[in-house]
Each structure stands twice: as structure tokens, then as C-alpha cells.
């Protein structure tokens, strides 16, 4: 089922008389395609949770509409929307067993929706199997690891057979290894069930790795929507370019003169169509090619061998950070010390306007 957001806006009144109101979400329009997993991504406070709560019905939009399939659900209470919600803190009932926790949402059903004991048992077991905790049903939450507790919370959301699954930073309380494992699990469960899912996270790597599409937000405003690779390769502005990627994009002060890009005194790249003037230059770590005749001259600081590839840490006077980090294949001949020179892969070099941070396109990318 499609989930459609139309001009969705949430303004919180100021908490005191003097304070300013907070525009938590501003004019958010997007259709989540049926069966997709959307990663809602951005720094803390950018409006991710508020968006999710409006979808769930826990928060009422100031303006705008929400559709589930053909139905306008904007004024429908949370319990009638058929959504499954999972939060960062698992919020399980400590005195209930795993089985009772998962069954809880089914118990107060009335009328046509009422289930028999047998039906409930079946549904609980099915949900527990899906998240692989069916052997832990008689335990209490405090007898489970964090990862297991989060699985129970996910099972509790799934047992209702929701039309839409909403996850708010579900992995934040888990340690690094469990986080990795559980995110793969969530992806598997989502694919198996085909439930349209919105996954909120501030972790770009997490969003990139499991989403069909990501939505990057800043200060309540959607910056860009697209497939993870496409947004990484072709960010619309400096904010998106800096927010995506580990190690992060390397930023230089540069200038364009007669369709040539300069970093310091080095003419580093031909940039057909780019207007003259000072620019912000972003170069992805994988955009550098060590080359004794390369145009970009840097001082070598360090070479870090990381198995499959090698990280070259170097200095350059035009850098906006103390050092740059280039990721290159380990079978290349590496500089030993002193000056290191780089050639640049054109599609890994991104230009941005100094005042607005908007992308300046050049070459073939200009029209696409
Ligand atoms: P995120 O989940 O991306 O960290 P939130 O959606 O929680 O961000 O918050 C977005 C903005 O709205 C923040 O500035 C936050 O302080 C503000 N906000 C959230 N909830 C309330 C509320 N109930 N009252 C006032 N301001 C709020
Ligand atoms: Mg939040």
C-alpha cells in the first residue's frame, strides 16, 4: 500500500511567551511506494520523529494530508490506522513474558476483529518465528539481550499485521555488532512481509545500507529523495554531500577560471560549463588517484593499511579540514613520504556555490 504525504507540516507552539514557534516539519510531500523501505535520514532535531508520529497518528499535522492507499487517514486515530510502531527504547512490559508482550496488542480486540485464544497463539508464534525469538517465548524481558528485546518489540508491531511499519531509531540502543545484525534482520523481515516501511535514523550508513530510497532532511525541510547510491553520487547541495559517506567527503576552497578548476595554484580538473568564481570543492575519498604526474599536490602525512584498501592521509593548504583522506586500492604503488600527487576522477569531484551551498554542475552532469 502506498503511503502519501501531501504538504505535511508540523509547527509546535513556543513553550513560553517569548520563545519562537518551532517548524518541526515543513511542507513534506512524498509518496512511499507500496512495499518499499524508506530511510528517513538527518541530524538530531531535523523532524524525523515528528514526521513518523504524524504518519502513526500520535501527532496531528498543523496542515497537509496523509493517505494510506486511497484513504485519507489524517484525522483517523492511531489505533485505527493499522500501523506497527517500534521505538528506540523497546518499551516492553517487564512483568509479562515475551509471549504475553507480543500478544498484548491482540487482546483488546472487539467485534469482528476479536480473535480466539488459538488464533492469537498462532499469530504470536508466527511473528516470533519471523524475528527468530520463538524459543524465548516464556522468558521475561530482563532475561533477554538488548537485541532480543528489540526483536520482541518488532514482533509485537508485526503481530497486528500492520499495513505500514514505522521504526524510530530502532537500533540506537544496540551495540555495534548487534546493530549490524539486527538491521539485516529488519531488511529480511521487511522483504518477506512486503510491508511498506518507514525507518528513521540519524546514521547515514544504516539508512544507505537497508533503504530502497532515502529521504534526507535538515531543519524540517526535505533536501533530497532518491536511491541511496544516486543521492550519494549526485547530491543536490553541500549539506547532503557532507551528510552521506564514511569517510566523509573532503572539502577544499577552490576557484573556477575559464572552465578549469583550481585548488591553490594547481589546475586540477577541466570543468566545462562551470561559471568563473570561487567555489567549494568536495572530493570523495575514492576520487583520488595517486599519480606521480597528477595535478593536485599534497603533503603526505600517513598511509593507513586497512586490508582490502589503503587510506592516504595528506595535507593541502586549501583544505577546509586539517587533512584529507583518500581511499585507494592496496595494490597501487604508494608514496613513501614528502609530496604526494593525485589525479582526480571527474565524477567524484563535486562543486558547490559558496553562498548557498547549491550544487554547481559541469560537463555531462550539467544536464542530468
Ligand atoms: P528528530 O527526530 O529528527 O531528532 P524531532 O522530530 O523529534 O527531531 O524534532 C524536530 C523539532 O521539533 C526539534 O526542534 C524539536 O525540539 C521540536 N519538537 C519536537 N517535539 C516537540 C514538542 N512536543 N513541542 C515543541 N517542540 C517539539
Ligand atoms: Mg527522533
Image: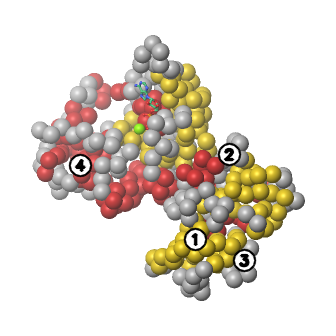
> Residue beneath label 4, please?
149
Q: Are marks 2 and 3 in contact (CB under 8 Å)?
A: no
> Residue beneath label 1, please?
314
Does 222 sit above or below residue 128? above
- Where residue 251 appears, as percent x and y from the top left, is 63, 58
Residue mark closest to the camera, 3 vs 1 = 1
- Where residue 259 appears, as percent x and y from the top left, is 85, 60
- Disc 1/disc 4 C-alpha distance (Å): 44 Å
- Disc 4/disc 3 C-alpha distance (Å): 53 Å
* Residue 82 in sight from this viewpoint: yes
Residue mark closest to the camera, 2 vs 4 = 2
> Residue beneath label 2, please?
357
342 or 233: which is nearer to us? Answer: 342
Residue at x 62% of width, y 44% of height: 224
Kindly state the secondary structure of the residue where label 2 is placed: loop
Where's the C terminus, which quadrant? bottom right
Residue at x 70% of width, y 42% of height: 356
> Residue beneath label 3, please?
294
Does 339 sit above or below residue 1? below
Does 32 sit above or below residue 53? below
354 or 25: which is nearer to us? Answer: 354
* Marked residue nearer the N-terminal end (2 or 1): 1
Kindly state the secondary structure of the residue where label 3 is placed: loop
320 or 228: which is nearer to us? Answer: 320
Amino acid at each position: 500500500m502506498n503511503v502519501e504525504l501531501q504538504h505535511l507540516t508540523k509547527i509546535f507552539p513556543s513553550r513560553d511567551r517569548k520563545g519562537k514557534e518551532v517548524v518541526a516539519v515543513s511542507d513534506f510531500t512524498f509518496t512511499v511506494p507500496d512495499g518499499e523501505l524508506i530511510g528517513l535520514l538527518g541530524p538530531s532535531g531535523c523532524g524525523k520523529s515528528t514526521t513518523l508520529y504524524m504518519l502513526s497518528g500520535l501527532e496531528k499535522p498543523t496542515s497537509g494530508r496523509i493517505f494510506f492507499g486511497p484513504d485519507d487517514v489524517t484525522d483517523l486515530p492511531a489505533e485505527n490506522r493499522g500501523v506497527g510502531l517500534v521505538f528506540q527504547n523497546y518499551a516492553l512490559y517487564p512483568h509479562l513474558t515475551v509471549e504475553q508482550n507480543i500478544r498484548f496488542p491482540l487482546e483488546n480486540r472487539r467485534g469482528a476483529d476479536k480473535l480466539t485464544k488459538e488464533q492469537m497463539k498462532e499469530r504470536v508464534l508466527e511473528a516470533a518465528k519471523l524475528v527468530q525469538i520463538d524459543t524465548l517465548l516464556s522468558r521475561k524481558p530482563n532475561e533477554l539481550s538488548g537485541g532480543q528485546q528489540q526483536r520482541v518489540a518488532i514482533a509485537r508491531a508485526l503481530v497486528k499485521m500492520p499495513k505500514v511499519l514505522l521504526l524510530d531509531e530502532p537500533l540506537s540502543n544496540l551495540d555495534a555488532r548487534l546493530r549490524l545484525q539486527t538491521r539485516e534482520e529488519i531488511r529480511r523481515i521487511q522483504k518477506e512481509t512486503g510491508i511498506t516501511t518507514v525507518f528513521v535514523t540519524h546514521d547515514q550508513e544504516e539508512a544507505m545500507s537497508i533503504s530502497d530510497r532515502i529521504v534526507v532532511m535538515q531543519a524540517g525541510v526535505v533536501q533530497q529523495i532518491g536511491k541511496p547510491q544516486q543521492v550519494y553520487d549526485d547530491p543536490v547541495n553541500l549539506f547532503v554531500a557532507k551528510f552521506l559517506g564514511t569517510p566523509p567527503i573532503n572539502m577544499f576552497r577552490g576557484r573556477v577560471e575559464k572552465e578549469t578548476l583550481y585548488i591553490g595554484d594547481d589546475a586540477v580538473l577541466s570543468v566545462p560549463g562551470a561559471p568563473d568564481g570561487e567555489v567549494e570543492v568536495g572530493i570523495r575519498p575514492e576520487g583520488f588517484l595517486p599519480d606521480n604526474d597528477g595535478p593536485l599536490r599534497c603533503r603526505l602525512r600517513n598511509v593507513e593499511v586497512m586490508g582490502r584498501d589503503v587510506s592516504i592521509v595528506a595535507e593541502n593548504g586549501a583544505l577546509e579540514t586539517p587533512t584529507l583522506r583518500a581511499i585507494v586500492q592496496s595494490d597501487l604503488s604508494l608514496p613513501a613520504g614528502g609530496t604526494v600527487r593525485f589525479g582526480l576522477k571527474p565524477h567524484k569531484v563535486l562543486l558547490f556555490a559558496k553562498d548557498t551551498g547549491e550544487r554547481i554542475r559541469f560537463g555531462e552532469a550539467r544536464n542530468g
